[in-house]
Image (spheres, grey):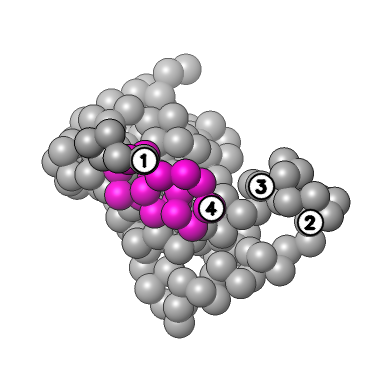
Amino acid sequence: MDERELVRRCRAGDLPAFEALFRQHAPRVLQTAYLILGDRQMAEDVMQDAFAQTFRVIGQLREPEAFRSWLYKMTIRRAWQQAARERTQQEAARRLGALPSEAGPSPYDEVERRRLVADAVLQLPAQQRAAVVLFYFDDRPLGEIAAILAAPEGTVKSWLHRAKATLARLLGEPQPTVGGEH
């Protein structure tokens, strides 16, 4: 059964249809929340809150085709609210850095590299972090990201550009030069 039909059935109160939507979207919603928050327990809480809210208000969704964007917008909003409750972004980065790593001592090991990237992403401002997660980790097109974040496409492009520059600086990667300067 396609997503639009599941949404229509949910709007009519069909619990098995909602469970099917949950199974279909839960892994990606959890990943999105985790990449924004850097904490699995908080991400699970955000996912549960987002789906509970979705269940309560799915009758208000006018266009069933917009369900996915609507769900991600709700997830990101909840993740931002949760992040705002944290005292600082540094606490979240420290928690992520304290996770056990399977990496060896080599700084170029893939597991260590992923931890460093995740740590750097957590240091981005909330809007940039959400744009990076949706674009690079969730492979969403710019138009969909703009709809989810309720921002013009140009703004999303700007957030991504700034985020890439910040991430390059935080990760110690060479910065591109402007005007031929080396």
Q: Where in the figure is residue 169, as x and y percent of width and height?
A: 44, 54
Q: Where in the figure is residue 109, as x and y percent of width and height?
A: 76, 44
Q: What element does badge 4 sit on?
A: loop
Q: What element does badge 3 sit on?
A: helix
Q: What element does badge 2 sit on?
A: loop
Residue at 83% over, 55% down: 105
| Residue at numbered disc 3 | 113
State which region is magenta. 161-177
Q: Residue furthest bottom?
A: 87
Residue at 30% over, 49% down: 162
Is residue 145 located in the magenta-colored stretch of the structure?
no
Q: Nearer the viewer, residue 112 or 53?
A: 112
| Residue at numbered disc 1 | 182
- Residue flagged by tag 2: what amino acid is it? Ser
Alpha-carbon distance for marks 3 and 2? 11 Å
Q: Is residue 84 above or below residue 10?
A: below
- Residue flagged by tag 4: what amino acid is it? Leu
Q: Kindly identify which numbered label has been placed on residue 101.
A: 2
- Residue flagged by tag 3: what amino acid is it? Arg
Which label lies toward us, 4 or 1? Answer: 1
